[in-house]
Image (spheres, rainbow, N blue to C red):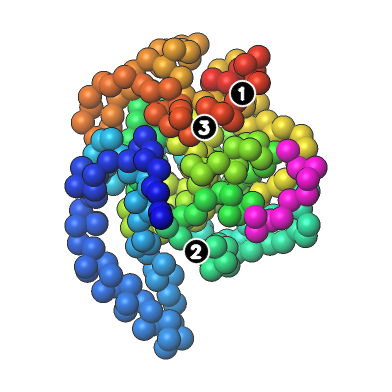
Amino acid sequence: MLIKRKRGWEMPEHLATPEHVFLNRRAILAGMAAAGATALSGGPALAAPYPARRNETYTLDRPLTPEKITGNYNNFYEYGTSKKVASAAEQLKTEPWSVRIDGMVAKEMTLSVDDIVAKIGLEERLYRHRCVEAWSMAVPWTGFSLAKLVALAAPTSAAKFVRFETFNDPKMAPGLAQSWYPWPYVEGVTMAEAGNDLAFIATGIYGKALPKVFGAPIRLVLPWKYGFKSIKSIVRVSFTDKRPVGMWEQLQASEYGFWANVNPEVPHPRWSQATETFLNTGERVPTQLFNGYGPYVADLYKGLEKERLWA
């Protein structure tokens, strides 16, 4: 007998209406079939994995935020400090792109994103996203659980943390020439966090491969943490016994810590975290502990009460 455990993020499908790109799902699927035919003829088939099948476990308590909003309100400091960085991010060259997996693993390897997707597969999940700047959105990510990438890497028992690193090429990202930032962008999680069901590696969004401004071609998504933890455009995944120090933690540790879990009761030094602005409507709504995912991640932090678990 199959018993389905209800989760806090679940709700009826009709209340999680996809954006316009999903409303034309049939046309997208037709394009997918055409891409497959192209592949058989020897041509490129990069669009073939999208759209991926939705994992119905992960749904929302709010409408999806339209891509026309999220695509034009984005942090990508490699391309500037403005939210309007979509045009500048087009300088990012995503082909070819490989990811180095190293450190405390059975065997170090370098794989293309296509190789990783072929080995692991893709699914779609609907997640809330909460920025440390007190704005939020809800988006449909495509990718795979971080736990599957960890399994592929086969880390040794000595590994305690996963360290992620992004690209560092000032020729295609002018922001990298700004020496006051400790480039490259680095972030990290514990092995326990990496093994949590919610931790996700995204290669797509809105039913297609990641646009550059979203961190193409591969990024991290940690929906219970503030957004700066979800590092973009990953080129290296390392397994280590030393806790990684993220770029923002290096820059200002008093404001941006390692854990960075969402908590409405712990203010940022310069603003409250009690509420957030939902980009879809401009409405100010109460912030939820762990961004609403508390029942599924709170156990990760038992015994760590003396740590500064909130950014």
Q: Secondary structure at mark 3?
A: helix
Residue 169 location, x and y as percent?
61, 49
Position of 244 compared to 140: left or right?
A: right
Q: Which residue sits at x=38%, y=38%? A: 7
**Which image quarter holds the N terminus?**
bottom left
**Label of residue 297 in the image:** 3
Between disc 3 and disc 2, whose residue precedes? 2
Q: Is residue 94 above or below residue 186?
A: below
Residue position marked by numbered label 2 in the rendering? 121
- CB contact under 8 Å: marks 3 and 2: no
Q: Amino acid at mark 2?
A: Gly
Q: Amino acid at mark 3?
A: Val
Q: Marks 3 and 2, Cα distance to the nearest angstrom?
A: 24 Å
Q: Secondary structure at mark 1?
A: loop
Residue position marked by numbered label 1 in the rendering? 302
Between disc 1 and disc 3, whose residue precedes? 3
Q: Is residue 62 magenta?
A: no
Q: Which residue sits at x=60%, y=25%? A: 301
**Label of residue 177 in the image:** none
Judge the density around disc 2: few (<14), some (14-19), many (≥20) Cα neighbours within 10 Å. Answer: some
Position of 141 compared to 155: left or right?
A: left
